[in-house]
Amino acid sequence: MQRIGIVIIATGPLTSDSLAKEIKEITGDEGLHFYDAAAPIIEKDSIDMNIAFWGDRYDQERGKEEDIDEWKKRIENLKEADYINLPMNKEEYENFVNELVNAEVVQLHEFEKREIFEGCMPIEIMAKRGLDTLRFGPLKPVGFTDPRTGFRPYAVVQLRQDNKEGSIYNLVGFQTNLKFGEQKRVFSLIPGLEKAEFVKYGVMHRNTYINSPELLDETYNYKLNSNIYFAGQITGVEGYVESISSGLVAGINAYMRYKSDESKTFSNKTMIGALAKYISTDNKKFQPMNANFGILPGLDSRIKDKKERYKILAEKSLKEMNITKV
């Protein structure tokens, strides 16, 4: 029996108002986002854990009468906490704020300013409101103790796990409009991030995308209607090659559904599969993602040399796809 009605909705940041309205009707009021205000994301293995420490606010704080040796033994059990914390002293904090407020920013369109600033505040704008503003905002140190000193730090930058595997972390509260080069320069001033590998820089721009972890599976198929597939940046993949990847997977699966009701998923050891898994895995803080080595499963042993590590990951991906390197 011939099958009809299978459709792929392929669109991106410049989705027309009429199509956006149709998508919103399909996915529901909470299913469509009209702007992207995202914090930078870094590789966990690039964080200096001699400076950073695990812990949730107050769970990690040392009591006034608590012996420091006993306290250090207790916080050793916090390796599975939700956050990685980066303590700063007064000099480090003030130097960071000074560089932040003087860094170059990307110029937004007027309509982007209206949409974005209603929902959140760029960290550089927040910093310009006063030297201590960040210490009473996203960098507040209350509830923490610096393991290196046994005392509360002057300020704390928090990193939150960004994927299920725990290989990449985002800088909490660091939504920003800084140019990418400036983000690398300024955020690397944070103690513990001197050698940070950024897999995605913070952005604040017009970007129409759906809440894919709630709506799509690994074939980019809409969970509530198996005849509908999505592709392109509307799914939360970011970039041209990434959009091609999503279209490839959606196209293959739309065809397979039409012919046989079967489906095809790609291994998460490949970039195609890792992107599909990222956008379809439960994530309450979901934000668009580009192709990067940080979303691939880690290697069994740690390799410090980045080029060598990436080479091995690429070779493993080619092997998964049964492709012989030429």
Image (cartoon, grey):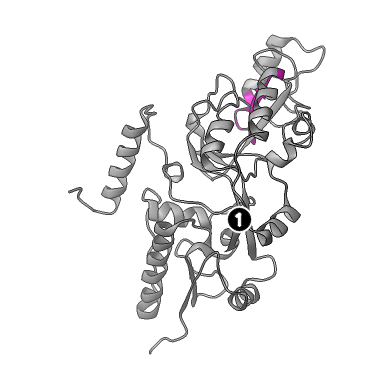
Identify the residue at image location x=64%, y=66%. Answer: 31
- Figure check: 112 above or below 126: below
Q: From which residue to which does the magenta span run?
A: 77-90
Residue placed most toward the observer, 257 or 43:
43
Q: Residue 32: horizontal and vertical position, in percent?
A: 63, 66
Whether 83 is among the magenta residues is yes
Q: Residue 81: horizontal and vertical position, in percent?
A: 64, 33
**Image check: 14 left or right of 326?**
right
Identify the residue at image location x=78%, y=13%. Answer: 66
Give the number of marks: 1
The kind of residue tagged 1 is His
Whether 280 is among the magenta residues is no
Q: Residue 174: horizontal and vertical position, in percent?
A: 65, 40
Task: Name, please, the residue furthest toward the bottom.
Answer: 1
Residue placed most toward the observer, 307 or 206:
206
**Image check: 258 left or right of 62?**
left
Quadrant in which residue 15 is drawn: bottom right
Quadrant in which residue 188 is drawn: top right
Residue placed most toward the observer, 235 or 253:
235
Q: In terms of secondary structure, where does tag 1 sit?
A: strand
In the rendered image, which residue does mark 1 sit on?
205
